């Protein structure tokens, strides 16, 4: 009887990053690591949560480290899920936390980690190209949260929306 593969557990955090228009989602292509079907791995940015670090802090740090993007703003906590997988004969149980983030388009950005190429895709295309089903689920959650936020804005009292526009105009004139 074969011995069962060892089990390792860890917590990770990442982000579903949307551009300022809300039309494009960030994915990272890892050309040197092939996924099923021999295609390059396409994934969302994420990584280990360090000791004493909050998931949201880890998500911002990891997204910046892997993608090189700066000026990220967390819009919503998308929740947690547990993912299990086997890699190189070791079983893993990963407790993942993800956050919906937006990146400011005018921000200066670093280059992504050498192993990654930063790609922007429409929501449906990003979901379709992701290598892992768990990450496709995060994109679906993020899109639902994004659409709900847009609906909440559309449902605002028109007088309040008009007032907000006037305030923005005054700020712009003062600058």
Image (spheres, rainbow, N blue to C red):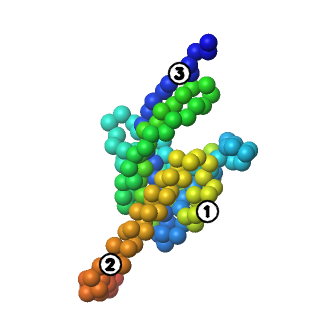
Task: Indicate the position of residue 83 as horizontal and vertical percent values.
Answer: 49, 39
- In front of the other: 16 or 86: 86
Q: Which mark is residue 125?
A: 1
Task: Indicate the position of residue 1 as horizontal and vertical percent values.
Answer: 62, 12
Tell me how far mark 1 sits from mark 3, CA to CA. Answer: 36 Å
Residue 168 visible in image = yes
User: For numbered disc 3, what is the local secondary structure?
Assistant: loop
Q: How busy is the neighbourhood of tag 1: few (under 14 within 10 Å), some, or many (20 plus)?
A: few
- In front of the other: 71 or 32: 32
Label 3 belongs to which residue?
6
The count of marks equals: 3
Q: Earlier in the sequence, mark 2 or mark 1?
A: 1
In the displayed structure, would residue 142 be above or below residue 157? above
Of all residues shown, which one is farthest toward the right? 38
Task: Examine the image and state in which quarter residue 89 appears.
Answer: top right
Task: Examine the image and state in which quarter residue 160 appears.
Answer: bottom left
Tell me how far mark 2 sits from mark 1, CA to CA. Answer: 28 Å
Q: Residue at x 49, y 72 (%)?
A: 21
User: For numbered disc 1, what is the local secondary structure?
Assistant: helix
Task: Indicate the position of residue 26 as horizontal and vertical percent values.
Answer: 54, 59
Label 2 belongs to which residue?
155
Task: Indicate the position of residue 50 as horizontal and vertical percent values.
Answer: 39, 36
Q: Residue at x 48, y 42 (%)?
A: 47
In the displayed structure, would residue 130 be above or below residue 36? below
Q: Earlier in the sequence, mark 2 or mark 3?
A: 3
Q: Which mark is residue 42?
A: none
User: For numbered disc 2, what is the local secondary structure?
Assistant: loop
Of all residues shown, which one is farthest toward the front? 1
Residue 67 visible in image = no
Of all residues shown, which one is farthest toward the top? 1
Tell me how far mark 2 sits from mark 3, CA to CA. Answer: 52 Å
Q: Earlier in the sequence, mark 1 or mark 3?
A: 3
């Amino acid at each position: 009887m074969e011995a069962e593969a060892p089990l390792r557990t860890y917590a990770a955090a990442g982000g579903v990053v949307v551009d300022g228009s809300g039309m494009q989602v960030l994915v990272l292509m890892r050309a040197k690591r092939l996924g099923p079907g021999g295609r390059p791995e396409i994934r969302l940015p994420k990584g280990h949560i360090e000791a004493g670090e909050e998931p949201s802090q880890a998500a911002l740090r990891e997204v910046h480290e892997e993608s090189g993007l700066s000026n990220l703003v967390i819009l919503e906590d998308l929740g947690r899920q547990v993912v299990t997988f086997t890699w190189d004969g070791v079983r893993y149980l990963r407790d993942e936390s993800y956050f919906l983030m937006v990146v400011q388009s005018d921000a200066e950005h670093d280059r992504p980690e050498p192993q990654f190429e930063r790609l922007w895709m429409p929501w449906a295309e990003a979901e379709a190209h992701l290598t892992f089903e768990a990450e496709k689920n995060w994109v679906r959650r993020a899109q639902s949260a994004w659409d709900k936020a847009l609906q909440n804005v559309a449902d605002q009292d028109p007088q309040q929306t008009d007032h907000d526009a006037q305030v923005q105009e005054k700020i712009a004139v003062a600058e």
